[in-house]
Amino acid sequence: MAVEQTLSIIKPDATRRNLTGAINKVIEEAGLRIVAQKRLRLSRLQASTFYAVHKERPFFGELVETMVSEPVVIQVLQGENAIAKYRDVMGATNPENAAAGTIRKLFALNIGENSVHGSDSAENAANEVRFFFSGMEIVG
Ligand code: CMP
């Protein structure tokens, strides 16, 4: 297995409830290393560009408004098989379907406020990491 990097976003529903540390604990206990992290308030342009792949979906407007409503914490996670591993650690997109012990089962409120985002492929991980971080900001 290769060492990979993946992009994680701790979403506004979680930062609002002061859950950054609790989520980071689950991430680190799963063996993923947080090699970059910053807290910021997304603009509408940043949120709609980041989620452009969903722009024709009926939930797109709500998704953008949710993502700009409060600060987010953007991270790069590194580890063996990090992309698939973080998707396992997050659990299903809809927390009703998420497995026990996953971040979304533990903390998510509903499908739109599902506490975290993680890249879904190697190509998207590379693009998403590049969208938010320069190489200098990632320290393994
Ligand atoms: P995320 O992994 O960040 O990718 C797109 C997001 O759209 C997803 O998590 C959900 O939070 C959000 N979303 C809102 N409604 C839906 C829906 N009906 N189906 C899929 N994703 C949704």
Image (cartoon, rainbow, N blue to C red):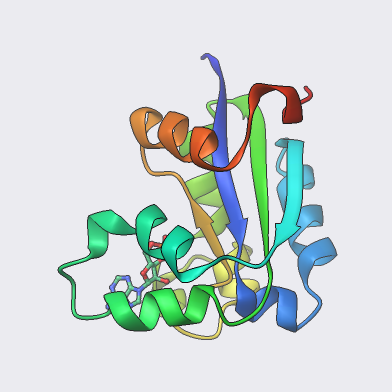
On the question of residue 94 being in view, the answer is yes
Residue 22 percent across, percent down from the top left: 81, 65
Question: Relative to 37, is 56 on the left or the right?
Answer: left
Viewer-closest of 81 and 132: 132
Residue drawn at the location 58% of the way across and 82% of the way down? 69
Give the x, y percent position of residue 72: 66, 65
User: How far across and down, in percent of the image, does residue 125 sit?
Assistant: 45, 35
Disc tally is 0
Which of the 4 image quadrants contains residue 26? bottom right
Quadrant of residue 100 in the image?
bottom right
Q: Is residue 70 above or below residue 32?
A: below
Quadrant where the image shows the C terminus: top right
The foreground one among 83 and 69 is 69
Residue 122 is situated, as x and y percent measured from the top left of the image, at 39, 28
Q: Quadrant of ligand 1?
A: bottom left
Q: Residue at x 57, y 78 (%)?
A: 108
Which residue lies at the image location 73% right of the left edge and 74% below the top edge? 15
Q: Is residue 92 visible?
A: no
On screen, residue 14 versus residue 139, left or right, reads left
* Residue sitting farthest toward the top: 2
Q: Nearer the viewer, residue 140 or 81?
A: 140
Quadrant of res 54 = bottom left
Taking the spot 66% from the left edge, 29% from the top edge, the residue there is: 78
- Residue 87, compared with residue 96, is above or below; it is above
Q: Is residue 68 left or right of residue 18?
A: left
